[in-house]
Image (spheres, grey):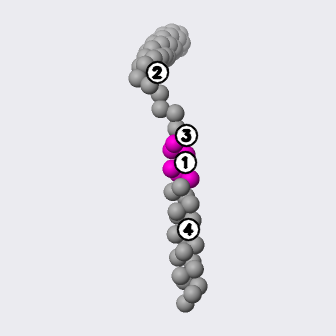
Amino acid sequence: MPKKSTEKKNVLSKLKDWFKSLKSEVRKIFWPNKEAVLKQSTAVVIISVILSAFIRLIDVVSQLIIKAVGSIF
């Protein structure tokens, strides 16, 4: 019987240690301020718009090329 209580204590000890390390890691998180979030969000939106326009341009050009090749045959 002592084996089971030792195993339970061991599991509980490991779980307690895990939560302690989790708490320690959460304290290390750097939370950006409002200005930084706004700047980064703006940059993401601008880059997304530019990339989507570029992909659309590639799509239109490739469609024109495919139509041109298709009309030859």
- Residue 71: image location, x then y, percent: 49, 11
Query: Can residue 56 be seen here?
Result: no
Mark 3 to mark 1 CA distance (whole Å): 7 Å
From which residue to which does the magenta span run? 21-27
Q: Earlier in the sequence, mark 2 or mark 1?
A: 1
Residue at x 54%, y 83% (from the top left corner): 4
First-in-chain label (1 vs 4) = 4
Q: Nearer the viewer, residue 47 or 30?
A: 30
Query: At x 58% / y 72%, what residue is drawn?
Result: 10
Residue at x-position 57% and y-position 80%: 6
The circle on residue 13 is 4
Q: Amino acid at mark 4?
A: Ser
Q: Residue at x 53, y 55 (%)?
A: 20
Q: Separation of disc 4 and disc 3 at Cα?
A: 23 Å
The vertical placement of 22 against 53, above or below, is below
Give yes or no for contact between labels 4 and 3 (Cβ–Cβ under 8 Å).
Answer: no
Q: Callout 3: few (<14), some (14-19), or many (20+) C-alpha neighbours within 10 Å? A: few
Residue holding disc 3: 28
Q: Which residue is mark 2?
A: 36
